[in-house]
Amino acid sequence: MSAAEIGVIGLGTMGAMLALNIADNGFSVAVHNRTAARIPEFLEKAGDLAEKITGHAELKDFVQGLASPRNIILMVPAGDAVDAQIAQLRPLLDAEDMIIDAGNANFHDSERRANEAEKAGIPFLGIGVSGGAEGARFGPSIMGGGQPAAWDRVAHILKAISAKYEGQPCATYMGIGGAGHFVKTVHNGIEYADMQLIAEAYGVMRDGMGMDAAACGAVFDQWNEGLLQSYLIEISGRVSAATDPETGTPMLDMILDRAGQKGTGRWTVIESQMLGAPVPVIEAAVVARNLSAARDLRLAGSEAFGSTADAMPSGALSFGELEQALIAGKILSYAQGFELLTKASADYGWALPMAEIAEVWREGCIIRSAMLNDMASALTDAPERNLALAPYFANILKANMAGLRKVAVTAMGAGQPVPALAAALNYFDTLTSARTTANMLQAQRDYFGAHSFERTDNDGAHHGPWLDQHLNG
Ligand code: 6PG
């Protein structure tokens, strides 16, 4: 067989699916896996596509099996495994050969790897790939980072294997260094927020309205026909309708309420704090996962205080109001995510293509939704404007905020936690405050630390009469 056009290292679920996708799009692909036994298993399951794939148990044979200059995709667990794999590969590669890290890397790691590669004069790409196993196999959303020339070299392959939105590939170059993985990280932060908002709506239906899982699923199915149309609402309907084959009860009711996480949502929050670009809905979603994981503490709390949650009086909330709450919460959390991207773009000198980010998320990725197309339009008009202020979304917010307020207040009144919905509401109420209470903070800072404040009537730094008046008083 002639030399392969591209290589994939790592035949875990994502790597295996990506290799099949590449072969399915007509490219010849070489594969390698640390545990060599996985390679023949994979080839056997590849069916007809195996004709386009060559497996190599030895890393040096894998490298030799690639056409020069080589393009090698790494799909190994993010972190140390990537550095270890790069260290093993480098001595076997020529100067023009390129490594493409397609895992969920921390963007700081991608920045470092890109810098190291640049110093050595070799190409490197860090690409965010979203869409889970199905996306990897049939079309993921791809967010690229690295030198433009490195991207251009493999863009035809990445665009071919990506999801398509009305024929347009969902694979876009975001910027140098770690830009692609930064955008993927924020994608995941938004994913956490979307999921938590949906989970809170489910909680209101289950605990406040006394609905069973199938009934909740029917409501999600209905919402999927409207403004909320999205992959996450669609699968929420599906998981709500599923039955546990072992017990015959709704599958959801058999799943322990302890959420896992690999850390990308947390990274979004850490980066937002470092950049001073708050993402409170995403933050609430990460905190909610952490508190869900502290199950023993929650059980002790529930025993000590009894459950604080009451069923809501019948008719307290309508499905229409719940839908409104989700619509408003979703817009506000995306507004925060895009604000974070805008701030990062300026601070890291990336010039992130804001409208194209919304475009690349329209298909293939986990947060794909109808609303992203309208977000792309709003960001095309004004890439740095907060999405909540874009006329189209401002009108939707005006029509839906009453629902968000009523749902958050009613749920909290009934003792039901709705941290992401409440965070969205508080963000909106702060965003629309011409006068906040930060004058009190400034007075306190000046009192104890002489940090000074700005005056409402005069420029410059000022101090208050604290000591005089305190001593005289
Ligand atoms: C995607 C997903 C994917 C994965 C993450 C999130 O875009 O395809 O975000 O990357 O599901 O690892 O997982 P956690 O919920 O475990 O953080």
Image: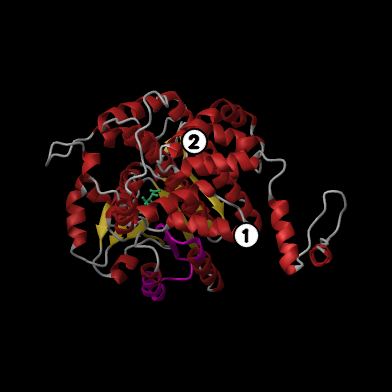
Does dot 1 land on a helix, a strand or a loop? helix
**Residue 263 position by quadrant:** bottom left
Crowd tier of the residue under label 1, counting other residues whose Cα lies within 10 Å: few below 14, some 14–19, many 20 or above: some
In the image, what residue occupies the spot 49% across and 68% down? 113
Q: Does the magenta stretch include residue 388?
A: no
Residue 312 rendering spot, x and y as whole percentages? 38, 31
Give the residue at x 39% y 56%.
Answer: 290
- Where's residue 204, x and y in %? 38, 35
Is residue 366 at least partly visible in the picture? no
Residue 73 located left or right of residue 299: right
Quadrant containing the C terminus in the rendered view: bottom right
Disc number for residue 408: none
Above or below residue 441? Residue 412 is above
In the figure, 16 relative to 463: above or below? above
Q: Name the residue under label 2.
A: 409
Q: What residue type is labelled 2?
A: Val
Inspect the image, locate mark 1, and give the three-letter code of the amino acid beneath it.
Tyr
Magenta span: 84-108
x, y (%) of residue 324? 48, 28
The residue under label 1 is 348
* Quarter occupied by the N terminus: bottom left
Question: For the residues marked 1 and 2, what is the alpha-carbon distance in whole angstroms?
Answer: 39 Å
